[in-house]
Image (tube, grey):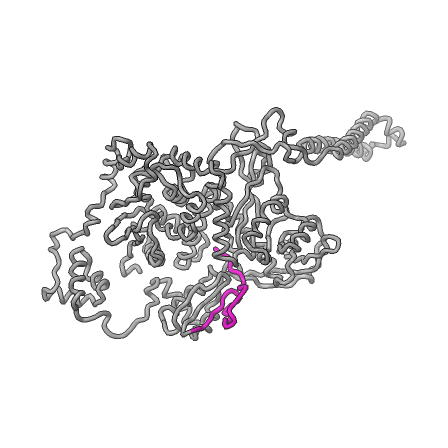
Amino acid sequence: MQLQHRIALLPTEAEMVSVHLAVTRHDEHLTFLNASGPIFTCREDDEGARRFAAVMLTEPSLGLSTPTQVAKVLGCHRSRVHEYRQRYHEAGAEGLEVKRRGPRGASKLKGEQVTRAQQYLDEGLSNRKVAEAVGVSEGTIRKALKEGRLSRVARTEEPRTPARERAASTPRERSDADAACAGGVATKREVERALAPRGVLPEAPVQFEAAQSVAKAGVLVALPALLSQGLVEVGEQIYGRLKNGYYGLTTMLLTFVFMALVRIKSAEGLTGYAPGEFGLVLGLDRAPEMKTVRRKLSELASRAQGLEFSRAFATRWSEENPDALGYLYIDGHVRPYHGRTHELPKTHVQRRRLCMPATTDYWVNDANGDPLMFVTAPANEGLLAMMEDELLPEIRKLAGEERRVTLIFDREGWSPKRFKKWKQAGFDVITYRKGKYRNWQRRAFKEVTVEVCGRQVKYLLGERLLRVAKGFRMREVRRLCDDGHQSSVVTTRRDLPIEAVALRMFSRWQQENFFRYMRHEFALDHLPTTAVEPADPQRSVPNPAVKHKRRELGRVEAALSKAEQVYGQHAHENPEQKIRTVRGFKISHAELGRQIKELRDQHAQLKTELKALPKRVPVEETIEGAPVVQLERERKIITDTFKMVAYRAETQLANLVGPLLPDRDDEARKFMRQVFALPADLLPDYEQGTLLVRLHSMSTPRDNQALATLCGVLNDLAVCYPGTELRLVLEATQPPPESR
C-alpha cells in the first residue's frame, strides 16, 4: 500500500485536516488535497458525495485522516462517519444513497419512455431492470404490461438478444474455425497475410469481431491505465513505426504489456495460449507467435533507442507528479546468469549467498514506491560509481536545476566526501551509518508515534550532530530497538522532523518488496536473449588474486591458532612438574615450536604479499584466453520498461479498487490479477462506436461489486481502443440485490 507523506505546498486558503490531508472551500465546493494534489471534490450540499468522502478519506490503508478529523470538516459527529463506513462495507456505494421520501419513480410512462421500455422488454430485461433504465417504478412497468401498453414475449419463447450478441461466436465455434484455416491456426485474414510478406502492408488494421467467453479478455480493464501511463504515445514518439508487416507498433506494444499483465513471462510462454483467442483481445485474427515476438523485439533493439524509450516514460511520469520526486529510493538488483555458453565476471548474489555470473541493475523508485527509472551496470560496479556517473545526472534532468532531491539508499553508498559534494549540488541523503559506533545511553532516546500504512507505530528515537569529515557534519538519528540494538541513520536534512527521517529510511522495505514482486509476478530476472556484446577490457574489477590470497591467509591463521592452542595446552598441563624449566619445555616440544615459527613466518609473508596486490585490475586479466563480453543490454532494457509500465498500470488500478476491499496490503493486487485473467464477451458496435467488454463473474458478490464500481470509474474516462474509434465500455456482472 502506498505510503502517504506530508503535504509540501498548499493554497493559501487551505485548512489542514491532518498532516497528510487538507481541504479548500470555494464556490460552494469542497476540495480535498494530499501531497499529490487534489484527490476529491464535491458540492457542499451533495449529501451522497459527502458520505462517500467520509468513507474514502478515512480508509486506514490510505493513512490520510481519522474519522474525528473528517467529521470536523464535514460538520457531523464522528459516529456518523463510522456509520457511513459500516454501511459502505456492507452494501457498497448503494449503502450511502440518500433515502428520499415518496415514490421511487414516476408513476406514468410518457412519450419516448414507452418506446425505450418496450425495447428493453424485447431484449429480455426484467421488469426491475427496465424500470431502472427508464426511470420509473417497477410497479409502473407491471401496470403498463397489465393494461397492454407494453408487451412481453411469451415465456415459452427465448428472450430476444441484440443482433451483435446473436452473432457472437462461441469458443467451440472459434476453435473449429481456427483449426480449419488453410494458412495456419486462426489465420482468417488471408488477403492481408498474403500482402504482409511482400512488404506492401504497413500493418493489419484492428477489427474486432463479436465473440463470447474470450479467454484473458479481462486484461482490457487495464487499457485506460496503460494509455494514461503513456504506453502508445511514448512508443510512437520514440519508435515511430515498425517495418511493413502484419503486426504494427501499437499491436506489439499492447502485446508485450498484456503478456506481462496476464503473467505470460516470456515469448516461449505464448505457446501455452490459443493464438486465436489472444488475437481477439488485440482486434486481430491471431496473436503474434513466439518467433514473431522475438523478431519484433530484435527490430526494436536494432534501433538502439531503449534508454531513450525508458527515459521518456520517466520524464512523463515526473511531469505528471513532480511531488513524487521529493524522495527517491535507490537500490541495486542483481540478476544472475545461469548459462554456460559465455564466461562473465562474477559478483555476490545475496539472496542466494553465492558468487556467480550476474549483472546489476540500479533502480530509482519515487516517493510512493513506484519505479521511475533504472540503469544496467556491469558486474561489480558499485552503487557509488553508478550514482555519480549515471543516476544523479538523469535525476537532475527530471527534477530540474533548482529543486532539491532527497536520496535514500543503504550502506553501500556510504561516502561522506561525496555527501558533501552532493549537498552542494542540490542532493540531500538519508542512509545508514557505516562502521562501528558506541551505543548511546537510554536517556538519549524519546518515544515518538509514527503513522505507517494507517497504523500507529511507536519508535524510541534520538538525534545528535555527527562529524563525518573535516569541516562537514551530518545529523545522526538513532532508533533503539526492543533487543537493545541501535540503528543509526545519518542525513543532510536538518529540517525534517526526527520521525520523518526514521520513517523514510525504514520505508526502504517498499523497494525490497518491489523487487520481490517483480521477480515473482513479472519475471524481472528473465533474460530475453543470451546474446552477448563486447565489453571494455580495461574496466576495473576486484582483483581475484586478493580473494585467493585472503583465503590462503585465513587457512594459515587457522593452523597457527590451532598450533598455539596445543602448545599452550601442553604448557598448562605439564604433569607432575616433569619439565621444571622453560628451556627444558621448549626442547621437549621443539617440533611443535618449529611448526609455530614456520606458520608465523608464512603469515607475515602472506600479509606482505596481500598488501602489495592491487585491489582492482582490468577485467581482461581475470578472464584468461576468453573475450571480454557482457550480456546484451538493449532487449533487456526494452522488456524491463514494458514490465515497469505494466506494474505502474496495475498499481494505478489497485489504488482505485483498494478502498472497496478488505484492509489487506496485497488484496488489491491479487484482485487485479484475477480480473486480468477473467474471460469476457467482446461485442463491438461500429454504428454506435463502442466496444463492449462484458466481464464474466468473479468468485464472490463482493468482488463483483468492486469490479462494477471500477468499471464505472474507467468508463467515465471514455478511452478508445488504439487504432480504432471504438470507445471502450466495461461491464461487470452485477450481484443480486440481496447480496449487495
Is 2 in the magenta? yes
Q: Quadrant of the C terminus?
A: bottom left
Question: Residue shown at 34%/34% (left/top)?
Answer: 199
Q: Is residue 567 above or below residue 425?
A: above
Depth order, front residue of 407/87: 407
User: Quadrant location of residue 542?
Assistant: top right
Q: Is residue 368 above or below residue 103?
A: above
Span of residues in magenta = 1-26
Left or right, residue 631 beside residue 133: right
How far across and down, in percent of the image, does residue 44 sit?
39, 73
How far across and down, in percent of the image, does residue 69 sit?
48, 70
How far across and down, in percent of the image, does residue 340 sit?
53, 28
Residue 484 can be seen in this image: no
Depth order, front residue of 588/239: 239
Furthest residue in direction front, as rendered = 200
Of helix, strand and loop, which mostly describes the magenta segment? loop
Left or right, residue 37 beside residue 488: left
Depth order, front residue of 154/416: 416
How far across and down, in percent of the image, does residue 381 sit?
61, 40
Residue 326 can be seen in this image: yes
Left or right, residue 481 beside residue 709: right
Question: Residue shown at 59%/60% (left/top)?
Answer: 500
